[in-house]
């Protein structure tokens, strides 16, 4: 087996176990959190020089947190179901004890004065944070190649991308550098890298996980979510991070969907009575044959497990890409205005001879990468007088039509399914000079974010033509996140 993949011969047994199994062993004191955390730090030390999943590894902090939770467990106090199991955190979430850069030069070395709510929940759950993972700059991209600090490699083939923007987290999970990870999904950044690395990734319903302390990309689309190697592990982490937060104005005050119970129920593999809709628009001739073949085999398997499968028509999904790549830049152009070289991070040319405007211009010119600049310019243009109605408003209307397509589809089915991506992992460098090709790769994941619903990517086998991972995307209505876990766990059990 490839030395970068989880369970490789060069790795410690502790780095190939599920988070649920590790938690059991730690809580029964068969092994300590310090040992488990150290094993993962060693794995990072061994292979991350090649993979570059991490931008920052917090060795001392992780071990201190592990020691602390070991003491609590010894005293009979187990703070959560995942206490003691270490985690990789996307560098878009603030941490007081490690730099937060969102993979941008403009924030290089930036230390946040506060922890994101999700960071704080992870700490309170007794989960040691191994470090901060690589991503596309400000979460804009589909390959982590837009990171100002160099790309992450896919452990399945290090000449290929692990996807993006959360490629760092997914590569860490797939390689056994971490059993748990946190990502953010604005247009697919959790689900898409999960699909390309054979891991599980979930974008929870908008408003159910706090965005406080998440460096904003597009605020009406961004959502923090869990990743791991199994559906149950992902569910356990989901319950740690979800919940109402008064510091996030879009946070919803309602009970967390019972995702862990749903994952356990799904593990029986029985899907009798579950209605699954296959999205016609995402079962397209011309996509990679190996991906479609794996998808059709997945649908056949769901049927065998008792699901009732119907085809659903969502005509406006064809316009999701155009709408997304207008709405997102508009929000980006507003959100990123705060990076002005005055308040945070990089400041260029402030030598006493230049005006504040000149310093801002120089700082932004040097601090932002080309994709971020492209989107700021595009968004500023689309929001300007005379264009607002033609572009932004029109895109918002399309957004409503997409939400209506979903609503109609859910009258007939409990969940929808589609391939997570149109192809398996592409080569590093292949799409960097062609933004449209890069955007097109997000086709299957964007509609869900525009409608604010929830989705999961679960491993669906290797494509026969490339021998690389594919993902089955499961989508569910708002606040029905538990359905993802019920169906995802059943599918995982059915695959064996
Ligand atoms: N690839 C998409 C983009 O570039 C999605 C990114 C994300 O989900 N953060 O916008």
Image: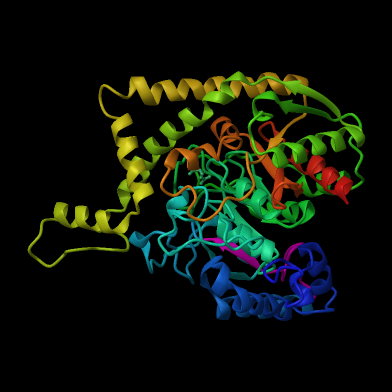
> In percent of the image, x 66 and y 69: which residue is there?
177
Which residue range is magenta in the image? 75-90
Q: Position of residue 283 (x, y in %)?
A: 69, 29
Q: Position of residue 11 (x, y in %)?
A: 73, 76
Residue 473 appears in view: no
Q: Position of residue 488 (x, y in %)?
A: 79, 43
Which residue is at the front of the view, 80 or 304?
Answer: 304
> In percent of the image, x 73 and y 67: which residue is there?
6
> Residue 420, relative to residue 396: is it above or below?
below
In the image, is 89 to the left or to the right of 235? left
- Is 106 colored magenta in this rendering? no
> In percent of the image, x 68 and y 66: which residue is there?
175
- Is 77 colored magenta in this rendering? yes
Which residue is at the front of the view, 26 or 449?
Answer: 449
In the image, is 240 to the left or to the right of 109? right
> Residue 110, relative to residue 244: is it above or below?
below
Total tally of numbered discs in the picture: 0
> Which picture quadrant has residue 172?
bottom right
Which residue ends up furthest to the front in the rendered image?
Answer: 465
> Which picture quadrant has residue 308?
top right
Q: Position of residue 196 (x, y in %)?
A: 65, 51
Picture quarter with the N terminus: bottom right
Residue 420 appears in view: yes
How was the colour assigned to the protein in this rendering?
rainbow
Magenta region, mostly helix, strand or loop? Answer: loop
């Amino acid at each position: 087996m490839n030395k970068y993949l989880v369970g490789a011969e060069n790795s410690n047994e502790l780095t190939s176990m599920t988070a649920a199994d590790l938690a059991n062993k730690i809580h029964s004191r068969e092994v300590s959190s310090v040992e488990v955390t150290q094993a993962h730090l060693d794995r990072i030390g061994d292979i991350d020089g090649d993979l570059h999943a991490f931008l920052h590894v917090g060795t001392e902090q992780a071990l201190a947190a592990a020691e602390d939770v070991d003491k609590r467990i010894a005293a009979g106090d187990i703070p959560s179901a995942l206490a003691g199991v270490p985690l990789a955190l996307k560098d878009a979430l603030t941490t007081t004890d490690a730099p937060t850069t969102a993979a941008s030069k403009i924030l290089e070395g930036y230390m946040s004065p506060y922890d994101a709510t999700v960071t704080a929940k992870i700490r309170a759950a007794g989960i040691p944070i191994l470090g901060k993972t690589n991503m596309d700059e400000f979460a804009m991209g589909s390959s982590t190649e837009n990171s100002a600090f160099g790309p992450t490699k896919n452990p399945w083939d290090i000449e290929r991308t692990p996807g993006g923007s959360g490629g760092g987290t997914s590569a860490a999970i797939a390689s056994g550098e971490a059993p748990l990870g946190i990502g953010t999904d604005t247009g697919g950044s959790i689900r898409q890298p999960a699909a390309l690395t054979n891991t599980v990734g979930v974008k929870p319903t908008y408003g159910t996980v706090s965005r406080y302390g998440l460096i904003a990309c597009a605020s009406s689309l961004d959502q923090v979510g869990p990743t791991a190697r199994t559906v149950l592990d992902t569910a356990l982490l989901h319950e740690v991070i979800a919940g109402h937060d008064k510091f996030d104005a879009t946070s919803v005050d309602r009970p967390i969907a019972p995702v862990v119970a749903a994952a356990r129920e799904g593990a029986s593999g029985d899907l009798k009575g579950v209605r699954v809709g296959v999205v016609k628009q995402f079962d397209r001739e011309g996509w990679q044959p190996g991906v479609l073949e794996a998808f059709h085999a997945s649908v056949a398997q769901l049927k065998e497990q008792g699901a009732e499968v119907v085809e659903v028509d969502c005509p406006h999904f064809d316009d999701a890409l155009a709408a997304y790549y207008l709405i997102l830049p508009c929000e980006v152009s507003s959100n990123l205005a705060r990076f002005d070289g005055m308040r945070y991070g990089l400041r260029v040319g402030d030598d006493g001879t230049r005006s504040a405007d000149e310093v801002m211009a120089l700082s932004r010119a040097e601090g932002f990468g080309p994709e971020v600049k492209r989107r700021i310019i595009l968004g500023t243009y689309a929001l300007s007088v005379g264009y607002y109605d033609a572009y932004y408003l029109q895109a918002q209307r399309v957004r409503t039509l997409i939400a209506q397509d979903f609503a109609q589809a859910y009258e007939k089915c409990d969940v929808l399914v589609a391939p997570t991506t149109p192809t398996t992992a592409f080569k590093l460098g292949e799409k960097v000079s062609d933004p449209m090709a890069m955007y097109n790769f997000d086709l299957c994941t964007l509609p869900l974010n525009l409608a604010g619903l929830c989705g999961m990517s679960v491993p669906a086998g290797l494509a026969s033509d490339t021998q690389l991972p594919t993902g089955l995307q499961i989508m569910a209505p708002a606040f029905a996140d538990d359905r993802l876990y019920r169906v995802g766990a059943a599918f995982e059990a059915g695959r064996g």
